[in-house]
Image: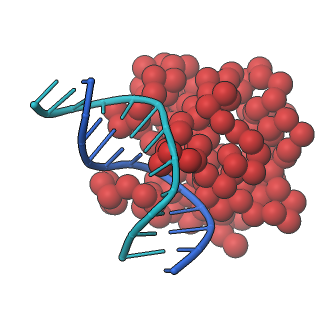
Chain colours: A red, B blue, C cyan
Amino acid sequence: MRLTQDFYGRGVVDVARDLLGKQLVFQANKGLITEVEAYGGPTPRSAIMFGPPGFSYVYFIYGMYHCLNVVCEEQGQGAAVLIRGVRLGDVYLDGPGKICRHLGITRDHNGLNMLTDQTLYITEGKPVSKILATPRIGISRAQDRLWRFVVEG
DNA sequence: CGCGCGATTGTA
DNA sequence: ACAATCGCGCGT
């Protein structure tokens, strides 16, 4: 079953943690989400993040990588969850750049409505046993906020 | 209008 | 430890 707008509309940290073990679907690919990070505030470069929850937010970084996020909370809040790890069968994609490169996700897929889109969305997956919370990777500020969540194992 | 940096990754 | 590589935000 596809995740609802109410799911994404909650606090971004709760959404991030609850996305672990959910199933990411892109075209013919399906994989379980194993690692995420929560983001919020005026930091991002895109306006998509400030729109309604449940939309994709794909940004281009370091001149060569794309990162896939899902917009959370109410419109205007500017919060999103970065998908950092996915397991497709026996293939582990550990890193936001690797996920998008492997699946072929680019900024062409920015701003898709994941509540209704036929190519990119998230469904219920497999419940996870234990969750680890750590500081986020690749940013120096707010190290006291444990907004990165990983499935143990 | 030009400059420098960034939610990354692979190689040395 | 660092290069690859480019769009955007900010400063001039």
Tell me if residue A99 comes above or below residue A122 in the rendering.
below
C10 left or right of C7? left
Tell me if residue A118 comes above or below residue A94 in the rendering.
above
Residue A94 place in picture, x, y as percent: 65, 62
For image coordinates 58% across by 39% down, the residue present is: A69
Residue A26 place in picture, x, y as percent: 80, 38
Rendering quarter of residue A66: top right
Q: Is residue A14 visible?
A: no
A45 left or right of A16? left
Q: Is residue A104 visible?
A: yes
Tell me if residue A9 comes above or below residue A68 in the rendering.
above
For image coordinates 68% across by 46% down, the residue present is: A100
Q: Quadrant of the N terminus of chain A?
A: top right
For image coordinates 32% across by 54% down, the residue present is: A142
A50 left or right of A127? left
Tell me if residue A44 comes above or below residue A150 in the rendering.
above
Q: Quadrant of the C terminus of chain A?
A: bottom right
For image coordinates 58% across by 25% down, the residue present is: A53
